[in-house]
Amino acid sequence: MLNGSEVTAKERKGSEYDYLKKYGQNWMKAGGNQDQEKNKPSQEFIEEHPRYEELIKKYGAPEDSEMKQQSSALKHALISIFIDCPYFPDKAPMSKKTAWFHDHSEVKELGPEAIQGGCCRIEVIIHQYA
């Protein structure tokens, strides 16, 4: 239980993995090592993260590739949406950059001018930015 909500084993495991990855670089800087014999994190790190060593024993040390910080900037989460009205070749296709959608109705909201212009069908092609 966390804040009155049930936490499933899958959610807990995922959170523990995320925790290992999030603090992996700090652990390495504090003397942590993927080689068990060389693994000697500082006392300060152990006091700040008392369960970190326990989680390493349970899941193994995070790999170098897992510890790379990914940008949380919005521009890295944007996608480009192209709205084209194939039945009206004289109407120029529209292109918009936006966040990822979970519902197709949100995509429709991006192109009301296409719908009002008499376009009875919208084709959407999504390209994710790198």
Image: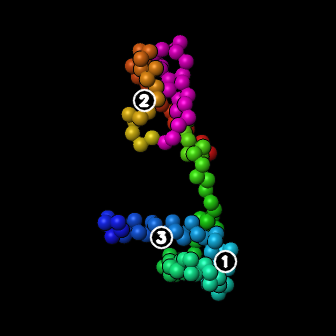
Residue drawn at x 36%, y 68% as measured from the top left:
2
Read off the residue under disc 3. Answer: 16
Q: At which x and y percent is residue 36?
A: 61, 84
Q: Secondary structure at mark 2?
A: helix
CB contact under 8 Å: marks 2 and 3: no
Q: Quadrant of residue 97?
A: top right
Instruction: Tell me the kind of residue under disc 2.
Output: Glu
Q: At which x and y percent is residue 102?
A: 41, 43
Q: Residues within 10 Å of mark 1 (few under 14, many from 20)?
A: some
Instruction: Tell me the kind of residue under disc 1.
Output: Ala
Residue 34 appears in view: no
Is 123 situated above or below 39? above
Q: Which residue sits furthest top?
A: 90
Query: Does 84 appear in magenta?
Result: yes
Q: At which x and y percent is residue 109?
A: 42, 29
Instruction: Tell me the kind of residue under disc 3.
Output: Glu
Query: Does 9 appear in magenta?
Result: no
Is 109 situated above or below 75? above
Q: Secondary structure at mark 3?
A: helix
